[in-house]
Amino acid sequence: MESTRALGYSLESAVADILDNSISADATEIKIEFWPLEHPYLYILDNGNGMVSQEITKAMQYGSQSPLDKRSTNDMGRFGLGLKTASLSQCRCLTVITMKDDVLSARQWNLDFVLNSKSWSLLSLDRSEINDYPGVSGLIDNGKGTLVVWQQFDRIVVGSLSFEDALSKKMDAVRSHIALVFHRFIFGEPGIKRISIYLNNKPIEPIDPFLSSKSEQIMDIEPIEINGVRIAAVPYILPHVSRLTPEELSSLGGEDGLRKKQGFYVYRNKRLLVWGTWFRMLRQDELYKLARVKVDIPNSLDILWNLDIRKSTAIPPEIVKRNLERIVNRIADRSKRTWTWRGRKETRNDVGHIWERYKTREGIRYLVNRDHPFVELICKTLGSEKSDDFEQLIKLIENGLPLNIMYLDMTEDKHFSTDTDSETRIRQLALKIVRLCGKDQKRILEQLSLLKKYDPFSAYPDVIEQLESEVLKNE
């Protein structure tokens, strides 16, 4: 029992493991309470099905169910160890009190008692012994459910000067962890019951890692079949950081978290297992940090995914990886384009830009578009001799682009400020260009029609159409 305490649970992953049991028991409300002062405790209370005496005794056994046994489709368990190993990784005394059919039952693992008795001594508590336990009144009020109580903490205080401060800080991490791992249950979606989860009476709000209401789902659900069982994969591209509110960016972990949390999000029975990894199919990169892939797997494929006891790691089998690689390549390219062009569709060939991208043998170059109407205007105005000087100026600008600094600024999510075009300025520029046409109205209308196909005029169709109307009135 002492050895299994070192399986590597964090406080948040341990709490999440207990919540799995509550969800499997059909709970619709889960309350987490902690008290860090005198006689500290943490308890998790649910209004699930509860257990009778024989069931709670079995649940407290190590390896209470074989991982090879077939489980119900909504069972969140795996090895029959989570309740014990998760709880005792954080404390030395685990008490479970449950109510079913109006009968209260309680069992307790106390590591010090086991150590002294030198035997597997599972304690059975009677009604008089459990009345004073925190959370019992809430369990009785529910009429059914299970209460898990942790006491005698010895791991949280290691390396900390203050147990109160240490537990309070760790519970902040617990809130964020639960908000992400169980976000689909908290938010509610077809096929699963909506669950309300509270931490010290404050509801936990879900964290949607895909920002589903704003993100772009770039492909339909990609079904993958293994042994007749369906795995669903859905790729998303997050909006560029400049389109996120401070609250949305914070929920994603800030600018640093945005990069670290790119990749696959693997769910088992709608519960998030693993996130922020490409499973070595792609390296983590600044240009891919807008990419997310939601993967849903059933509990019947646990063995193939090498699921561990803590339910914190899962490795896809080769047959799944081959299917996912196709999605990875596509979503990585889209994320790169979204980040680089900040929302401008590179595939739009109907609009001419002032800068053009060229691929040469030496690499990528960005050149000023010599066919842009305003560039042509300057050249015609200057005449042949000065046009050569203007061409040399353009080449100096092209060769002097600070690409390395621009790349660093973009990867650090720096916001670029630009002068805002106004309708008045666009009209003045357009008039300068059309004046070169003289009084030839047909040529003026052709020139105005051409302007609609170039930046920045393409963003102001009303201005160009107004000028066209003015030309037609003067016919």
Image: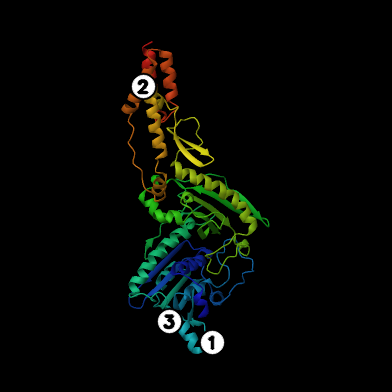
The crowd level at tag 1 (other Cα within 10 Å; few <14, some 14-19, many 20+) is few
Residue 52 placement, left or right of 68: left
- Which amino acid, by three-letter code, is at mark 1? Ser
Taking the image as drawn, is residue 378 in sight? Answer: no
Q: Residue at x 51, y 57 (%)?
A: 193
Q: Which mark is residue 316?
A: none
Of the two numbered discs 1 and 3 on the same chain, state the one appearing first in sequence. Answer: 1
Residue 238, given in percent of the width and then of the height, sits at 46, 47
- Which amino acid, by three-letter code, is at mark 2? Thr
SS label for mark 1? loop
**In whole angstroms, how far apart are the C-alphas of marks 1 and 3?**
22 Å
Q: Which mark is residue 119?
A: 1
Residue 239, given in percent of the width and then of the height, sits at 44, 45
Q: Residue at x 50, y 76 (%)?
A: 6
Q: Which residue is mark 3?
A: 129
Residue sitting at the far bottom: 117
Q: Which residue is mark 2?
A: 381
Whether label 1 touches label 3, CB < 8 Å? no
Residue 143, given in percent of the width and then of the height, sits at 46, 68
Where 315 sits versus 53, above or below? Answer: above
- Which amino acid, by three-letter code, is at mark 3? Glu
Where 57 sits versus 29, above or below? Answer: below
Where 440 sits versus 391, above or below? Answer: above
Residue 273, given in percent of the width and then of the height, sits at 52, 61
